[in-house]
Amino acid sequence: MTMPTQAVQSKGGSSQPPPLLLALQAPALFQDGRVQRLKLLGRGANGSVYSCILPDGTLIAMKEVLLPSSSTSSGDATELFDGVMKEVSIVSSLDHPHVVRFFGSALEPEEHRLTIFMEMVPNGSLASMVRHMPEPMKEEVARVYVRQLVSALAYVHSRGVVHRDLKCDNLLVTGDGQLKLTDFGASKIVGMATMATRAAQTMVGTPHFMAPEILVGGDDGFEGGYGRRADVWSLGITVVEMMECGKAPWPDFPSTGAAFMHIATPGSLPIIPARFSNEARDLVMQCCRRDPAERPTSEALLSHPWLLESQNPLTAGKEAPDSLPS
């Protein structure tokens, strides 16, 4: 569905929609052949993400998802289609400064393709950035990013959405240093009427970031209604990953199975570097409590002392630094 736009007068006297409203017209512009694809940004199992340019020069991201054809087994086809439409439903319902913005989608049945239009985040993933840093991110810089991430997560949870794959790979960074949560393909919507007691009961996510109750429980991994608390566990792991040049706080496992076994073992806890301040260590330890009932909610974390500390004087007056330190 294309949203109506209101034209504005340009300096030259011509009438054209402002950039945001034009971006919301992306599906219609795409179907008219007026969206130019620029380059491939990434490729996944079912599709690819490209940078694109609109007629006014605005850059956006375009995710092309290949849908199953009639030759695909009916069960697999239904699961894939439902999963794609679920992601569209989730991202279209979210509106937060630290969540990637959704501009619309276009379905092409004959091409077996769904195209999703999103905000362009030029600096790529936080994971790529921290893995190429010559030294660990300074704590005062990490705190700014974590504050933004917790804000986004609290909002997503308030909307009844469990992300289920939180990690630096799914955090994008804008040109002015703003963090954006993305990739809701693994997410689950918990019905508002039951969101306080029910949870998503599917084992999904990345092993090194998955909460132990998921690994132990399998399909019943969210037993007790702690789906959102599993996101909080992943948040704690992500904080360490962010400050340790992209390395998760676990030993080097020889296989995914070994990672599963170790994290699922009772009493197993992530390794927190000694250089962390007491406040940062406390935040990670609270997030990574083995019992999900003992973990704070994402909303409660907004008041954690580490996140309430004064910002680095170098970034005073800004919500985030302009760039990561080189």
Image (spheres, rainbow, N blue to C red):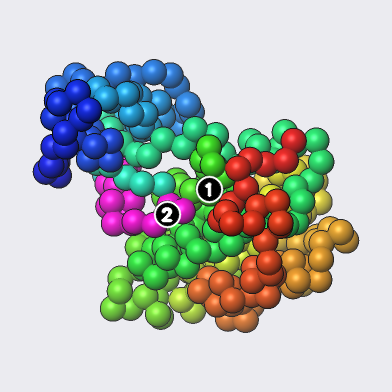
**Is 7 placed above or below 164 here?**
above
Label the magenta part by its dominant secondary structure.
Answer: helix
Q: Is residue 299 left or right of residue 63?
A: right
Residue 164 position, x and y percent, is 49, 57
Residue 310 position, x and y percent, is 68, 66
Q: Residues within 10 Å of mark 1 (few under 14, many from 20)?
A: many
Give the residue drawn at x 51%, y 74%.
299
Badge 2 amino acid:
Pro
The magenta segment is 79-99
Give the residue drawn at x 22%, y 28%.
11
Check disc 2 and report its element: helix, strand or loop.
Answer: loop
Residue 170, label in figure? none
Residue 157 visible within the image: yes
Looking at the rendered structure, the number of numbered marks drawn on it comes to 2
List the residue tagged with mark 1: 178
Residue 200 position, x and y percent, is 42, 65
Q: Residues within 10 Å of mark 2 (few under 14, many from 20)?
A: some
Give the residue drawn at x 64%, y 68%.
307
Badge 1 amino acid:
Gln
Which quadrant does the C terminus fall into? top right
Mark positioned earlier in the residue sequence (2 or 1): 2
Task: State the image quarter where residue 287 is shown.
Answer: bottom right
Residue 97, label in figure? 2
**Is 157 placed above or below 39 here?**
below
Magenta segment includes 82 = yes
Give the residue drawn at x 14%, y 25%.
14
Q: Is residue 280 left or right of residue 203?
A: right
- The answer to whether the residue labelled 2 contacts the one labelled 1, judged by CB atoms less than 8 Å apart, is yes
Which quadrant does the N terminus fall into? top left
